[in-house]
Image: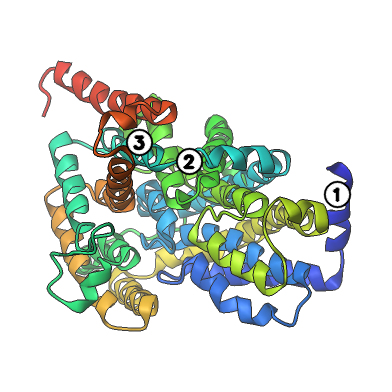
């Protein structure tokens, strides 16, 4: 293995490969930061440009873009409360409140350092565990996926801020939204009064509306109020060392969570970031500070979603099973270059997977350097007056939503969810459970019904599967223990 890894590193130090890594990083930052252009869209757009390339530089360009785009989504999530990628939604929970406090530099620095550490740790884990860990993912059937989704939804008790009832209302709203469209099992149309809704409510435009557009409405409302504008005293990496030291455990734990979630096909970076964020909040002594600008929340989200990227490459390269939508597109890129992902890839052309492994280790420091150098530039966005910033963010929202499918339909969805998000803000209803439900609700429904088909309608089948049973027990503890504790507190509201 070490010999193959050295071979992989030796292929990188050419002008062509280094240019591909540099180009992939810059394009990935841009694509990730612009709401609507997801990593999968970016990879799909660049695949045609790799047709004439050799396999190694072509694949390294695409994978570097994939890694950088996941971090890029956190930039706008922190500065503008407009997550560039779905996985960056959890980053905005604490990133944007820090920006509002005048500490955008601190938030950006923590996010890029956590992203780089997550990418490196996950890449190392990928090198040593790609083949055996991918085998574990094959044991996940409908029962296990259903239990994983239930476990994710149970996190609403930890992600809630203030009233548990309001958090449950938000979660139920998200679950109702994902029932719109064609039934994934029976093919029956549900709650769709227009043809566009047959495919369901598009997640990314809804996410842009809930977070970014609702913030635009808030900017418009408060634009006439006096505002204090000053650049934070936190300058670059050195000024954030204290914050990083305090969250060193999260900087290691988040990549481990992200990698494991990334390996599971279909789980993806969004679920990884949400679960990691919840775990950080659950184990923190100052739980109430989460959502108010706690750097640990940023590190938990960014470390996990960036670690999930190498994790998703494990089953792709070792078994030919994509761990995410972006990884699925990468399978097409491998096929175009005449390569077949799976065990034979490691035996016939070991230079391919090990060059990819080496590029992941090399991309992280480059990504860190670009991120730290750009902190001062991105922080200055916070100096723009609210009414101008609202116009800019609103324009980005519309552009990002339109780019989702090159039509006005996702723009209308974004506007509707922007109004819903604004109303939720006024009613102090958190929007985080809505995101959680929209991400996990479909996974829960589809796999429960598949499990019922496999078992002939026997619900006990799910509890008979060891992995599923453990996840359901953990879900019960995660949901009900905080509720019981809240009832024991005096003067609980």
Dot 3: within a 10 Å radius of its alpha carbon, few (fewer than 14), some, or many (20 or more) residues? Answer: many
Residue at 31% across / 37% down in the picture? 455
Tell me if residue 332 can be seen. Answer: yes
Q: Nearer the viewer, residue 163 or 174?
A: 174
Dot 2: within a 10 Å radius of its alpha carbon, few (fewer than 14), some, or many (20 or more) residues? Answer: many
The span from disc 1 to disc 3 (Cα, nearest Å) is: 38 Å
Q: Nearer the viewer, residue 146 or 251?
A: 146
Q: Residue furthest toward the front?
A: 456
Colour logic: rainbow
- The residue that disc 2 covers is 300
Instruction: Mark 1 and mark 3 in contact? Answer it, CB < 8 Å.
Output: no
Marked residue nearer the N-terminal end (3 or 2): 3
Q: Nearer the viewer, residue 413 or 287?
A: 413
Q: Image height check: is 182 above or below 395?
A: above
Q: Mark 1 or mark 2: which is in front?
A: 1
Residue 166 relative to residue 98: left or right: left
Quarter of the picture containing the C terminus is top left
Residue at 51% across / 53% down in the picture? 108
- The residue that disc 1 covers is 4
Position in image of residue 65 (x %, y %): 61, 66
Quarter of the picture containing the N terminus is top right
- The residue that disc 3 covers is 147
Label drawn at residue 254: none
Instruction: Mark 3 and mark 2 in contact? Answer it, CB < 8 Å.
Output: no
Residue at 53% across / 58% down in the picture? 70
Residue at 65% across / 58% down in the picture? 367
Residue 161 relative to residue 82: left or right: left
The span from disc 3 to disc 2 (Cα, nearest Å) is: 23 Å
């Amino acid at each position: 293995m070490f010999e193959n890894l050295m071979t992989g590193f030796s292929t990188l130090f050419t002008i062509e490969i280094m240019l591909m890594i540099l180009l992939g990083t810059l394009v990935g930052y841009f694509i990730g930061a612009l709401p609507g252009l997801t990593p999968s869209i970016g990879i799909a757009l660049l695949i045609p440009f790799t047709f004439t390339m050799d396999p190694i530089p072509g694949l390294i360009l695409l994978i570097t873009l994939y890694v950088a785009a996941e971090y890029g989504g956190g930039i706008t999530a922190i500065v503008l409360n407009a997550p560039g990628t779905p996985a960056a939604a959890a980053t905005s929970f604490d990133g944007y409140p820090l920006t509002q406090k005048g500490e955008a530099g601190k938030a950006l620095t923590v996010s890029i350092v956590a992203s780089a550490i997550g990418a490196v740790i996950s890449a190392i884990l990928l090198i040593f565990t790609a083949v055996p860990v991918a085998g574990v993912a094959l044991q996940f059937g409908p029962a296990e996926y259903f239990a994983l989704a239930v476990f994710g939804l149970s996190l609403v008790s930890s992600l809630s801020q203030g009233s548990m009832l309001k958090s449950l209302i938000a979660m139920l709203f998200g679950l109702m939204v994902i029932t719109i469209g064609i039934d994934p099992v029976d093919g029956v149309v549900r709650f769709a009064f227009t043809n566009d809704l047959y495919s369901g409510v598009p997640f990314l435009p809804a996410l842009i509306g809930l977070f970014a557009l609702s913030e635009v409405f808030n900017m418009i409302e408060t634009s006439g109020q006096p505002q204090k504008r000053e650049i934070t005293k936190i300058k670059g990496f050195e000024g954030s060392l204290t914050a990083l030291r305090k969250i060193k455990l999260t900087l290691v734990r988040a990549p481990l969570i992200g990698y494991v979630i990334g390996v599971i096909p279909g789980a993806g970076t969004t679920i990884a970031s949400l679960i990691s964020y919840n775990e950080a909040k659950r184990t923190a002594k100052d739980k109430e500070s989460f959502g108010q600008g706690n750097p640990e929340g940023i590190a938990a989200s960014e470390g996990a979603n960036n670690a999930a990227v190498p994790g998703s490459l494990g089953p792709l390269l070792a078994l030919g099973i994509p761990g995410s939508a972006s990884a699925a597109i990468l399978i097409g890129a491998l096929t175009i270059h005449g390569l077949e992902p799976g065990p034979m890839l490691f035996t016939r052309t070991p230079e391919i997977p090990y060059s990819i492994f080496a590029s992941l280790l090399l991309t992280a420091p480059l990504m860190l350097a670009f991120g730290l150098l750009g902190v001062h530039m991105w922080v200055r966005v916070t100096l723009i007056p609210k009414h101008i910033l609202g116009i800019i963010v609103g324009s980005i929202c519309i552009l990002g939503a339109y780019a989702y499918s090159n039509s006005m339909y996702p723009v209308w969805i974004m506007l509707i969810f922007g109004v819903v998000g604004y109303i939720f803000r006024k009613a102090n209803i958190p929007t985080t459970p809505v995101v959680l439900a929209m991400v996990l609700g479909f996974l829960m429904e589809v796999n429960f019904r598949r499990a019922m088909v496999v078992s002939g309608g026997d619900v006990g089948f799910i509890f008979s599967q060891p992995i599923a049973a453990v996840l359901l027990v953990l879900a019960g503890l995660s949901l009900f223990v905080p509720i019981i504790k809240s009832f024991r507190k005096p003067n609980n509201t």
